[in-house]
Image (tube, rainbow, N blue to C red):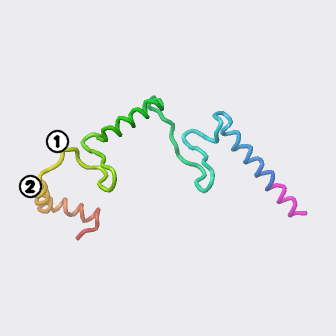
Amino acid sequence: MKNNVKQFKSLVAIIALTGAMGAMGANDGELSTGDWRYVGGERGWSFAPALRDGRSRADVLQELADFRKNPVSGAWRHMDGEPGWIPEPGSGEGKTRAEVLKELDAFNRNPVARARAADLYGTP
């Protein structure tokens, strides 16, 4: 008899939980609460914040089309394949070899900077 009562209570709990989950998504036609969306399967709940910048889908698609025509963002150009992002020529960013070597020499002469790097990265 006790086994039947436990099974009945489990069944009631499952039905109540299913009903509560269904009620959460009743307002927008999907199971969601705020920025969390129920996607099912192993993932269960997924964080998917709503678009808050006021752009429409058409605006975003137009921005994507413009980027595909000229894949530059800031001082970087996107190259397909293995190279990925490379500095845009003439962007004015970057350092010469001499500047990098001078900066490295200054770092190596600074015991405080070396101690901090050793603490962060575990280098001797």
Say above or below: 17 vs 101: above
Q: Residue at x 66, y 39 (%)?
A: 25
State the CA–CA distance, disc 1 to disc 2. 19 Å
How far across and down, in percent of the image, does residue 35 sit? 54, 40
Residue 5 vs residue 79: left or right? right
Q: Residue at x 56, y 43 (%)?
A: 36
The amino acid marked with disc number 2 is Ala
The magenta stretch spans residue 6 = yes
- Frontmost residue, 60 versus 3: 60
Residue 45 vs residue 77: left or right? right
Is the Cβ of the residue at disc 1 closer than 8 Å to that at disc 2? no
- Image quadrant assignment for residue 29: top right
The amino acid marked with disc number 1 is Gly
Q: Residues within 10 Å of mark 1 (few under 14, many from 20)?
A: few
First in sequence, mark 1 or 2: give its number.
1
Marker disc for residue 90 = 1
Q: Residue at x 34, y 54 (%)?
A: 81
Residue at numbered disc 2: 98
How far across and down, in percent of the image, does residue 77 sit? 27, 45
- Frontmost residue, 68 versus 43: 68
| Stretch of the chain drawn in magenta | 1-9
View extreme (bottom): residue: 124
Marker disc for residue 22 = none
How far across and down, in percent of the image, does residue 67 sit? 34, 38
Residue 10 vs residue 26: left or right? right
SS type, badge 1: loop
Q: Residue at x 64, y 39 (%)?
A: 30
Characterize the magenta stretch by its predominant secondary structure.
Answer: helix
